[in-house]
Image (spheres, rainbow, N blue to C red):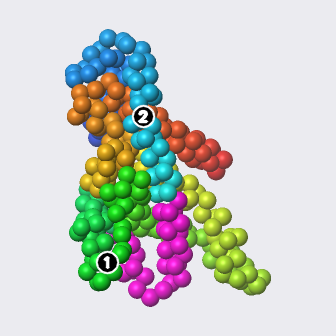
């Protein structure tokens, strides 16, 4: 084999095993799951076509709609707060303050933890008999109450708190990279024209970060839709199923209640939500690349 042929073939040989494994264990199992969602599978897979029976069951279950509503509340607040907080911290660090490197490390550190660790830690912090409420009581404020973790109406917000704590630093890093990529000459010209710092950020800097906003939104929404380990570690889906999300709903019915077909239908609805976000993003990126 000549050197030129080897140079052309070798990259394909190196990439081929990964490609085959991804094809089988990612896309193959997606197709398998999709087929199961159209069957009457229960404890074990059954491959006889049953039509939309599992989707009809899914959409008539109150628990599924609670999970979908929780995803809307959790996803909306998580994305909004994480992006605003990340942007604020990035703007602060962009002022070239002292100890910037140390502060950046502190804000980024939560991303080094798994969601299981984050959920467990915040479960201790928010436990009325163990964490924040007990600490304030020990300080002498006996009337203080913070029982969100055990309140069905407020428990979903504890997941928002923990998720924002873990992800805001990552969003900060995205925005800080975007801020450092803006041409300083534009900002200097605006200052020469008499624009103040708030005006510069509002009229020039933040509009220039539009691609970063879009990327951060896609990533955070992807995290929100797939959230499972954080919920299981923090609330277990409770009290009752007040903090169920589609991911925990799917796991409960597919693996603990022997309803594989129903769980597969829930998984396909999650996949459709992800696709609805990723496809516009890919279209936008490809269209931008063609224009460039």
What kind of element bears circle 2?
helix
Residue 93 part of the magenta-drawn span: yes
Name the N-terminal-most of marks 1 and 2: 2
Looking at the image, which residue is at 33% across and 36% down?
Answer: 250
Front residue of this view, candidates 270 and 256: 256
Crowding around mark 2 (Cα neighbors within 10 Å: few <14, some 14 to 19, many 20+) is: few
Q: Position of residue 207 (x, y in %)?
A: 66, 64
Looking at the image, which residue is at 31% across and 77% down?
Answer: 142
Q: Position of residue 17 (x, y in %)?
A: 27, 36
Looking at this rendering, what residue extends furthest in the top direction? 48
Residue 281 part of the magenta-drawn span: no
Q: Is residue 176 above or below residue 140?
A: above
Q: Which residue is mark 1?
A: 142
Q: Which residue is mark 2?
A: 62
Image quadrant assignment for residue 181: bottom right
**207 horizontally vs 24: left or right:** right
Q: Position of residue 5 (x, y in %)?
A: 34, 36
Q: Position of residue 52 (x, y in %)?
A: 43, 18
Measured Cα–Cα span from mark 1 to mark 2: 38 Å
**107 horizontally vs 282: left or right:** left
> What are the residue bounds of the magenta stretch?
80-109
Looking at the image, which residue is at 39% across and 66% down?
Answer: 165
- Main SS of the magenta part reads helix
Q: Is residue 42 above or below residue 225?
A: above
Looking at the image, which residue is at 34% across and 38% down?
Answer: 249
Q: Is residue 28 visible?
A: no
């Amino acid at each position: 084999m000549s050197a030129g042929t080897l140079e052309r073939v070798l990259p394909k040989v190196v990439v081929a095993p990964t490609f085959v494994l991804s094809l089988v264990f990612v896309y193959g199992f997606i197709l398998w799951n999709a087929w199961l969602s159209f069957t009457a599978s229960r404890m074990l897979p059954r491959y006889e076509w049953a039509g939309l029976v599992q989707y009809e069951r899914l959409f008539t279950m109150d628990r599924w709609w609670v999970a979908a509503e929780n995803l809307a509340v959790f996803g909306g607040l998580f994305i909004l707060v994480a992006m605003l907080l990340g942007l604020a911290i990035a703007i602060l660090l962009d002022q070239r303050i002292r100890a910037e490197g140390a502060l950046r490390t502190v804000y980024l550190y939560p991303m080094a933890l798994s969601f299981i660790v984050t959920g467990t830690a915040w479960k201790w912090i928010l436990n009325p008999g163990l964490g924040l409420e007990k600490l304030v009581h020990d300080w002498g404020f006996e009337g203080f109450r913070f029982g969100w973790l055990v309140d069905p109406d407020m428990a979903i917000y504890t997941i928002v708190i923990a998720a924002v704590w873990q992800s805001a630093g990552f969003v900060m890093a995205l925005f800080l990279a975007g801020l450092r990529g803006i041409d300083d000459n534009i900002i200097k010209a605006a200052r020469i024209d008499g624009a103040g710092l708030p005006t510069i950020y509002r009229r020039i800097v933040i509009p220039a970060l539009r691609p970063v906003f879009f990327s951060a939104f896609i990533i955070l929404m992807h995290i929100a839709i797939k959230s499972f380990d954080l919920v299981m570690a923090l609330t277990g889906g409770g009290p009752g199923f007040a903090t169920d999300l589609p991911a925990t709903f799917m796991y409960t019915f597919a693996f603990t209640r022997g309803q594989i077909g129903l769980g597969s239908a829930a998984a396909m609805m999650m996949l459709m939500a992800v696709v609805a976000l990723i496809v516009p993003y890919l279209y936008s990126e490809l269209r931008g690349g063609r224009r460039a």
